[in-house]
Image (spheres, grey):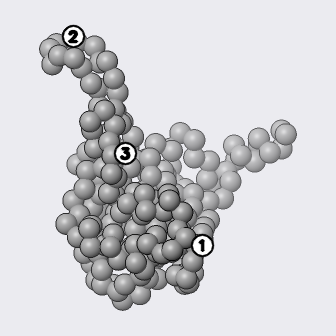
Amino acid sequence: MELLERIEDQIAATHLPLVGVTLAAVPCPDTPVILTLHWHGFIKEKLADVEGAQPVAFTPIPSSALQVNERWDDLLAVDQAALDAAWQMGAWDVSRAERPACARPGARSAEPLECLQAFGAFPYGVNGQQLVVSDAPDADELLKLAAAKGYLMWLFRPVSGGIWGDVADDATLSTEGRRAGRCPLNPVPPSCDGKRQTVYRFGVPGPRTEQFAEAT
């Protein structure tokens, strides 16, 4: 599963920097996964579309939710795809969340909303604007499966193509904020039997962090 090319194609098309990238999947082989790109930027709202009019409000640019239809037979293949994309785009780490079915008895009231958000299906907007623009025709079916069987979500914040270049102090990155090759870490098999968090750490503190630590 090649996620990096899809992400970089979207960056090239929008000319916007990323705040973060999330990937959501249900534990059922050969089902689509939802890739959501969270952009940094604002839409300027004006009272009149005339030259010189000043904006009266700023609305965040909607995230982009894309359906990825590549086949897979093991969740470790999805895990590896997320790790490889995050590694090459210079992310400090990847956080993988395992979430149980939100339709179970005793589920917290926030869990259905968290499930919707993971699959790019925000039920509300801001100032009449969507928070996510979705190109995911099978999202409704995936949400039904996630509500019944649980789901997994991966999160990483890229340096390359993202907003983090000025604050990244990572000795493993190139000057372009990237790393070469596939991720050297091995995926950890998910248990898919409850709520768990797994963090894959890539980064190594650079000279600025070390100097700060010595000064304090």
- Distance in Å between CA atoms under marks 1 and 2: 52 Å
- Quarter of the image where one finds residue 149: bottom left
- Residue under the point 27% across and 67% down: 139
Q: Are marks 3 and 2 in contact (CB under 8 Å)?
A: no
Measured Cα–Cα span from mark 3 to mark 1? 27 Å
The image position of residue 136, as x and y in percent, is: 23, 64
* Dot 1 alpha-carbon crowd within 10 angstroms: few under 14, some 14 to 19, many 20 or more: some
Please indicate whether residue 213 sits to the left or right of residue 67 in the image. Answer: right
- Report the residue marked by disc 3: 39
Q: Are marks 3 and 1 in contact (CB under 8 Å)?
A: no
Residue 143, percent from left and from top: 33, 69
Residue at the image position 23 percent from the left and 70 percent from the top: 138
Write down the residue under mark 2: 52
Please state, as top left, top right, bottom left or bottom right, where the N terminus lies in the image: bottom left
Task: Tell me, yes or no, whether the two marked residues, 1 and 2, touch with CB atoms within 8 Å.
Answer: no
Amino acid type, callout 2:
Gly
Q: x%, y% of residue 174? A: 51, 54
Q: Amino acid at mark 3?
A: Trp
Determine which residue is flagged by label 1: 196
Instruction: Please tell me whether mark 2 sits on a helix, a strand or a loop.
Output: loop
Q: Nearer the viewer, residue 149 or 151?
A: 149
